[in-house]
Amino acid sequence: MSFGYWFKLAALALAFSITLLCIYWLRDGHLSQALNSLGVQGQGQVLNWCDQRVHSLVYIPSGAKIMEDNSQWKWTIPGSESVLLDYLSIEKWFAKYCHLPAEPIREEATGMATPLLEVEFITSERFVFYEMENGFIRARGQVFKAPTLREAIKELLAFGPKIQ
């Protein structure tokens, strides 16, 4: 067998390996993280807060709850009937806001923290977004600046009936 045959075989094996590596990166989000860190996508840091399927969201100040039940999203407020929400609209909301642009804050998180939004996943794991006195957000032990989160919550609350 000639040198050309072995060269082509090695080139094909290398190309196959690179393809498998790229598929792995795309599936696990490694490629987008690498591009973000290089500034190629221009988004900077991204907070992926719903890395699992979300079961419910509770807006703590009012007690309003959006929860998935039998493949339907329902809006409930303590003391009132639940209202069915448009399934596709809620799923689009998650697609839009699961990855929030966020700037990590290096300073110590001190001061009063007000619970803002509780997230429960289908695995029963929960966490809460807290709003700090200085306007920063704390969640999962990290403090960050995420103005888009307030926009997301405002849009989420618009899906249900008016809160009094």
Image (cartoon, rainbow, N blue to C red):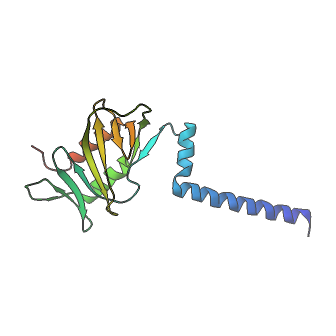
What residue sits 55% from the left and 36% below the top?
Answer: 39
Quadrant of the image for the C terminus? top left
Residue 40 quadrant: top right
In the depicted view, which residue is nearer to us: 89 or 36? 36
Name the spot of residue 109 as percent of width and height, x first. 36, 34
Viewport quadrant of the N terminus: bottom right
Which residue is located at x 43 percent, y 35 percent?
103
Residue 2 coordinates in the image, percent (x, y): 92, 66
Identify whether 60 is placed above or below 72.
Answer: above
The location of residue 32, given as percent across then percent down, is 53, 47
Q: Residue at x 56, y 43 (%)?
A: 35
Q: Nearer the viewer, residue 115 or 24?
A: 115
- Where residue 63 sits in the image (x, y, percent)? 16, 49
- Picture residue at 25% right of the left edge, 43% below the top: 116
* 81 up-or-down from 93: above or below: below
Q: Quadrant of residue 90?
A: bottom left
Residue 155: image quadrant is: top left
